[in-house]
Image: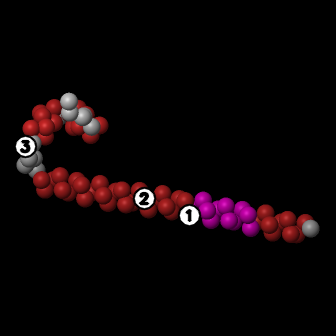
Amino acid sequence: MATTRASEIGSYLFCARAWWYQRQGVESVNQAELSSGTKLHEQHGRKVLTVDLMRGLAYLLLLIAILLLVSYFTARIL
């Protein structure tokens, strides 16, 4: 019994015939488009990772700023 992956279900829902061809081992004729799409997805993934890292850095800097403010006002009170 063959294992069905989630990506295969997505392929089947998008185009049952393309899914069947893929299961039969038939090579797609639009390799240039597939390669281009893969590159676009990789670029998008890098952008998403960059945004996530920048967001994490922003939260860290905000936390440092709050801690500095608290320590400043605590020192002034004492």
Disc 2/disc 3 C-alpha distance (Å): 34 Å
Three-letter residue code for mark 2: Leu
Residue 51 at x, y percent in the picture: 46, 59
Instruction: Judge whether residue 63 is colored magenta.
Output: yes
Q: Secondary structure at mark 2?
A: helix
Q: Identify whether 37 is placed above or below 67.
A: above
Residue 49 visible in rendering: yes
Crowdedness near tag 2: few (<14), some (14–19) or many (≥20) residues, C-alpha within 10 Å: few
Furthest-right residue in this view: 78
Residue 1 at x, y percent in the picture: 20, 30
Mark 3 or mark 1, whichever is nearer to me: 3
Colour scheme in use: secondary structure
Residue 18 visible in rendering: no
Q: What's the mark number on residue 49?
A: 2
Instruction: Judge whether residue 50 is colored magenta.
Output: no
- Look at the image and tell me in which quarter the C terminus lies: bottom right
Residue at screen point 44% across, 62% down: 50
Furthest-front residue in this view: 1
Q: Secondary structure at mark 1?
A: helix
Residue at screen point 22% across, 53% down: 37
- From the image, tell me which residue sits under label 1: 57
Mark 2 or mark 3, whichever is nearer to me: 3
For the record, the magenta segment spans: 57-68
Q: Mark 3 or mark 1: name the one nearer the start of the chain.
A: 3
Residue 70 at x, y percent in the picture: 79, 63
- From the image, tell me which residue sits under label 3: 26
Q: Mark 2 or mark 3: name the one nearer the start of the chain.
A: 3
Three-letter residue code for mark 1: Leu
Q: Mark 2 or mark 1: name the one nearer the start of the chain.
A: 2
